[in-house]
Amino acid sequence: MSSIIPCLWFDDNAEEAVDFYLSIFPDSKITGITRYPASDHPAHVGREGKVLIISFTLRGREYTALNGGPHFRFNEAVSFQILCEDQAETDYYWEKLSAGGDPDAQECGWLKDRYGLSWQIIPQPFLNLLQHPDEAIRTKAFHAIHGMKKLDLAALEAATK
C-alpha cells in the first residue's frame, strides 16, 4: 500500500528536532536512521557517517526528517494542525511548541517552533463555532481570533454570546 509521508528538511539538526517532537507527542518513536555514505557530491562532502534521514512517528503518524543542508527552509505555506479537545490541551501544545520559537510569528492560533516549522494549535470547540449554523456566531468567532496569539477558548465562546 502506498503512503504519503511528510519529509521535513533540516540543515544538520534533524536529530535534535526529532527528539524535541518526540518529547512533546505521546505514542511517538524513531523507526529508523540512515547515515550518509561516502560521497564526492558537493552537498555531501564531510557528512559521511552523519545522520541523513530519520524515520519517526508522532502519535502513530509517519514522518521523515532529512539533514539536507542549508538549501531550503520551512515557510508558512505548509503547517501542521493539532486539533485539541480543550483549553488545557491547547495550552500544553502551545507552550511546548512555541518554546524557543519566533514570537513575532504567532497569530490566530499559529506559531513557528524553534526550527521554523509552522503549527496551528486549534481547540475543537473553536472549529465548532466556525461551523455553527448561525452565521452571526460564525462571524463573531472568526473576528474574535484577531489580536490573539494562542486561541483562548473562553474568550472565543464569550465573544459569540
Image (cartoon, grey):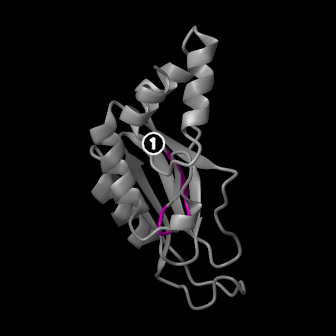
Whether residue 63 is in magenta: the answer is no
Residue 53's spot in the image, x, y percent? 51, 65
- The quadrant in which the N terminus is found is top right
Write down the region rendered in magenta: 113-120
Provide the secondary structure element on which disc 1 rests. Answer: loop
Foreground pick, 26 / 121 = 121
Give the tally of numbered discs: 1
Against 93, residue 123 (above or below) is above
* Crowd class of label 1 (few under 14; some 14 to 19; many from 20; radius 10 Å): many
User: Would you say residue 31 is visible in this rendering?
Assistant: no
User: Would you say residue 67 is visible in this rendering?
Assistant: yes
Image point 48% across, 20% down: which residue?
Answer: 128
Image point 52% across, 85% down: which residue?
Answer: 48
Residue 151's spot in the image, x, y percent? 45, 42
Residue 2's spot in the image, x, y percent? 59, 34
Image point 57% across, 84% down: which residue?
Answer: 38
134 left or right of 61 in image: right
Image point 41% across, 53% down: which residue?
Answer: 56
Whether residue 116 is in magenta: the answer is yes
Q: Quadrant of residue 117?
A: bottom right
Residue 92's spot in the image, x, y percent? 30, 49
- Residue underneath mark 1: 151
Foreground pick, 64 / 136 = 136
Against 95, residue 35 (above or below) is below
Check disc 1 and give the amino acid type: Leu
